[in-house]
Image: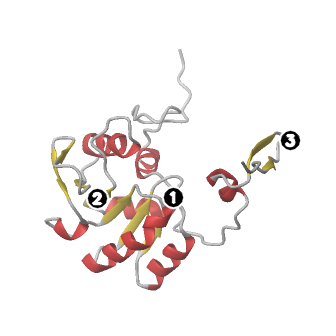
Amino acid sequence: MAETEFITAQKANGLSCSMPADSPLAKLLFSQRTWVGPDAKERLAILRTAKSVAIVGASPNPARSSYFVGTYLQQSSDFRIYFVNPMADTILGEKAYPDLASLPEVPDIVDVFRKPSDIPGVIDEVLAIGAKTVWMQLGIWNEEAALYGEEHGLTVVMDRCIKIEHARFGGGLHLMGFDTGVITSRKYVR
């Protein structure tokens, strides 16, 4: 059996971490990211103008992050939410669709919970239906697919959670990621 090679990642604060060289985290830490997506103001504009969101890779399993994000968007936004999963009939009490082409409308944002190698196919589906924005969740990074999407007129957001961004811009992000109401910098006198 081959011996696993380990590498050490050194952080700016002096802490280090050893990990298998072929692990996804090692590949991410040592990759040279050159693509830059929309800045905070542009992401805010995307969220403010959107009326509908399709969640590709949505899961009926409450332990999955797509389920948590779907729950948050249903309860804390005015978006029309569409769940896309060919293996599910319903998710969070709503009809699940087998693919983007089956949706009753073209969504303003296609939020993606799929592995990075699946992203080129998702980009092709997004382009085929005429959606304008594809939003890839935290940990999902495919620079080639993002560049391809942008070359074909898509707005691409990558490696960002739509729930976190929505809550942050709405003033309701708690350290645990829950919507707690408005956050203010005002000091209250007792």
Q: Is residue 74 left or right of residue 134?
A: left
Q: Residue at x 77, y 48 (%)?
A: 3
Q: Is residue 165 left or right of residue 128?
A: right
Q: Give me the C-alpha separation between circle 2 and circle 1.
A: 18 Å
**Residue topped by disc 2:** 53
Q: Residue, x 21% and y 71% (percent of image)?
A: 101
Closer to us: 43 or 16 = 16
- Give the residue at x 54% y 19%: 189
Q: Which residue is mark 1?
A: 140
User: Of callouts 2 and 3, which one flags the residue occurring earlier in the amino acid sequence?
Assistant: 3
Q: Earlier in the sequence, mark 1 or mark 3?
A: 3
Alpha-carbon neighbours of circle 3 within 10 Å: few (<14), some, or many (≥20)? few
Q: Amino acid at mark 2?
A: Val
Residue 68, percent across and down?
35, 40
Secondary structure beneath dot 3 equals loop
- Where residue 52 appears, as percent x and y from the top left, is 25, 60
Give left or right: position of 85 versus 95.
right
86 or 113: nearer the eye?
Answer: 86
Identify the mark nearer the N-term, 2 or 1.
Answer: 2
Query: Where is residue 29 drawn, in percent x and y?
Result: 70, 56
Label disc, if present, on residue 14 of the rendered structure:
3
Indicate whether 171 appears above or below 128. Answer: above
Q: Is residue 70 above or below residue 136?
A: above
Going by the numbered disc 3, the residue's amino acid type is: Gly
